[in-house]
Amino acid sequence: MIRFLAAVTSSGDSIPLGITDAGNWFLQNVWLIPLIPAMSFIGILFFGKRLPRGGSELGIAALAIAFLLSICTGFAWMDHRDNFHGEEISQALVSGEHGEHGEHGEHGEPSLAVVNTTTWFTTGGVEFSVGTLVDGPAVMMLFVVTLVSLLVHIYSTDYVAGDRRYTHFFAFLSLFSASMLLLVISENTLQLLVSWELVGLCSFALIGHWWEEKENSNAALKAFLTNRVGDMGLLIGVTILFFATGKLLPDTFGSFSIVTTNALASAGLLSHSTLLIAACCLMAAVMSKSGQFFLHTWLPDAMAGPTPVSALIHAATMVVAGVFMIARLYGVFFEGFSIGGSSINLMALIGGFTTLVGACLAFVQRDIKKVLAYSTISQLGYMVMALGVGAWTAAMFHLFTHAFFKACLFLGSGSVAHSVHSFDMKSDMGGLRKEMPQTFRTFIIGSIALAGLPPFAGFWSKDEILVGTGGWGIMGGTGGNGSYTFMLVMGMITAALTAAYMTRCVYLTFFGEFRGHGHPHESGKRITVPLWILAVLAIFAGFLNLPKGFQLVPKSLQERFGHYVEPVAGYFPQISHATPSWSLAIVSTIIVIAGVVFSWNYYFVKVENTSKETGESLTELPNGLTTRLALARMGHTLLVNKYYLDHLYTGIITRAVKEPIAELAYRSNQEILDRTVDTFGRSAVKIGQLNYFKIDQNVVDGFVNASGRISSESGEELRKIQSGKVQSYAAILFAAATILAGLLIVIV
Amino acid sequence: MLLNQFLILSAVLFSIGVYGVLTRRNGVMVLMSIELILNSVNINLVAFAAFREAISGEVFALFVIAVAAAEVGVGLAMVLLLYRNRRNIDLAGIDSMKG
Amino acid sequence: MVSLFVAQIRGLDQLESSEVLVAQNVFFAIIALVMVLAALKMVTTENIVHAALYLVIVLAGAAGMFILLGAEFIAVTQILVYIGAIIVLFLFGIMLTKGSFGTEEGEFIEKSQMAVLVAVLIVTVASGSFIDSFRYTELSREAPSTTAEIGDTIFSQFIIPFEAISVLLLAALIGSVVIARRDQ
């Protein structure tokens, strides 16, 4: 790529990319970060069993180094963002293709991403490069992935202790971390695709970790196959973008480079319809990977894997790969879906719908992990919705905070399950606050953060998304990319639902009386310490991006996250930022509190009292809404059956594809073909009879008899060729081919 | 040297190989004759590579060698399977395809 | 005797280019003759182990041809892969299926006239067209191709075919294991 970029800076036929190839050592050598866990994967695979701790120490060491490197990279990036004044690289274009490049005046100093590429291979005149693209989102993801992965590694040493595939487990955790880290620093879409698939593979291996149970291996297969559906979209989208960009670049017919693609898209040089198609294809990939409605069905099933895996993969890192991909190729999505200045688009709609769907489903789950899984779906919907309304920074910030509190909640649920040996909240939990105080406290913190009550992390990011919809026009919180009032409403409803189902979950797990068997006990240090680290982050991470114009803090502390993470560069679209509004924050908080109070009233007051009256630990009212109201019962049934989506996929779609096609083939065979043949036959017979008496008998018969005798005799001879012997066939084949070749030579 | 020297040599070897494939009843022998055919093709490829001063012919010859190795592996596995099922590897005896 | 031979070899590089050509032609004639005879022996011999050994001669001759054509890397690969690996594989195949051949029906199919006919047809058509097209075209190679050149070409221009071949080899590996495995 560098070759094409031969420092054209101010020519008319070039476009500024907003990247540079100079920078701090840490920014230049960021490839080390995925390499170290990858090496640890190989190390664990080969030597893990011989090591005293079964390979886990190797994984933890690798992740610790990667984490330290990520922190250094983070600081290097902050310094680079503020103080770097180097040469910007531009992309030469085919002459005559001038674009209108606006200046990025609004956000102040442009940020120059550090790009390093090297040629991987060249074939047919196209250079395939690998490289690293270090900018705000990449650095942020590096930090999140390495931190959560490190904590999950430590947690797992206790959680899966004594497992028969302990070493295997850690090997795949390492590989997973490596793939995810590779994904976030990918310089081109091809590299993105490769790491995307690797991540999917690891997810498959880890969900099916206990594959001896059919259910688990089915869940792994389901996740894998559902992801394949989306991967086709990714492949097609990447190919479309490759050829679309190639038209504008000299000396090549395509480019996988993410920055080039984004820059061309943002500058309006690529046709809108191409971008729309590409964005739709990529959206399919996001829907499968990030569990968006209607390809989300694999994610709850994926809870079959060990809990640390659920925390790492299905909450904090892998499932956000889709969200990250949108953020990475935001130029394409922004132009393709016309996000700016509209009031609805496909991405925002999918996201908004998913967030509602997931939140509703979380209400009816018995399994604590499934509650969290649906909550993950819902929160991912939030992020996609945020990206869909143009609130890029808000989406990234929510990704950041969500990673901490969701990992905290997942690991907390694992800690509970570790002690009661079950995930079923209704039959095996309850009243655990006394036995497991550490887990209880961290879980409460995570829940509050997820529900979004100030000043916990979730509040700030959620509020920013709601502001970013630009739908809050009444009291001054406007100025977003469009007026997505519909999305604002969906977000508000979800906020209330989230608060309510988390209250339910907390009650069923930690309050009331213990309904399980045995004696639950607090988990060990290796489980509680990661929990506390995540809980602390769940409290304080929100302060990193205090809203602009927030009167209670000095200006230098506002929007730090946005400043460092959001690119202001040629490869990033010009998005506008909504103005935060106190009124919206207050209203959303009131809605969340309303959700909590509603749920509290049901569980902590009514159910608790009824339990005391009846003397047993109940999980719901005996004469609740579902028993009294037919409509509520129907709704409940619908939710319990997950909107019948699984039935739709396996029962209806699969069968619809299988059976009617067979039926159709049979019918067409029977009716169309047979009838045609019949008709032909019948008319032939008629004509034959007609002929028979007149012509046949007299003239033709003699002739036919003669020819019949000849053909029967020659058939007798030819029969010998049809011997069934391979070699005689081969002889004929060779002879025929040679004769044909000879004929060709003579003719040509 | 003439180009034709090599080309005709390869043609002769090719036809000998074909003869072997067509007449031998032993499965292993047939595979060996196929190797002979592939080798004559390689001579042809390398001769043309030398003639045109193009390296691609030699690269192709390398690919042919790799494919031949794969072919022998699979072919011998099939012969072994045949031997296990029928206690001989007589190709003349395999006529279940006979109509 | 040996010193004489060495002296001759030493003398080779002082030869005129026309003399080199003569030497090359002589070598070609010898190798080609040996190859054709060995090939004929191979397809006609009754003893299958002998056939394998004749095949070795043919393969070695082909390696000699490659050297004459200035393709040293191919020659080395030929010896490594064919004589080093494939022949061994064949010998194993012969060993494992030994005794499978009764002599009652012989090594050959009954009617081999057809095969002779086909072989002659191939030679005629191929040589005819070669002679017709290239008649007295000289090979005018200036320098032998180097291994570095081949490596460069494979890993740039032919990288995708190369990857495809590696996948093919893997598939063949797995395939042959699956085919030859004893079913439980």
Image: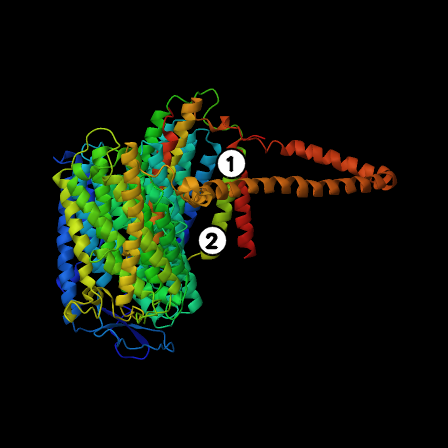
Where on the picture, by quarter, is residue C32?
A: top left
Within 10 angstroms of label 2, few (less than 14), some, or many (20 or more) residues?
some
Coloration of the structure image = rainbow
- Residue at (35%, 59%) from the top-left corner? A385
Q: Between A136 and A401, which is closer to the camera in this rendering? A: A401
Which percent across, then down, holds residue B43?
37, 48
One can see residue A40 in this view: no
| Circle 1: residue type | Ala
Within 10 angstroms of label 1, few (less than 14), some, or many (20 or more) residues?
many
* Above-or-below relation of A154 to A247: above
> Which chain contains the residue that carries disc 2?
C
Which percent across, then down, holds residue C76?
27, 45
| Circle 2: residue type | Ile
- Residue at (63%, 41%) from the top-left corner? A667
Element carrying mark 1: helix
* Above-or-below relation of C172 to A10: above
Looking at the image, is mark 2 or mark 1 nearer the viewer?
1
Q: Between B45 and A344, which is closer to the camera in this rendering? A: A344
Give the labeled residue for mark 1: C115
Which percent across, then down, holds residue A432?
21, 37
Q: Between marks 2 and 1, how big is the CA–CA gap?
A: 24 Å
Give the labeled residue for mark 2: C131
One can see residue C43 in this view: yes
> Which chain contains the residue that carries disc 1?
C
Which percent across, then down, holds residue A410?
24, 44
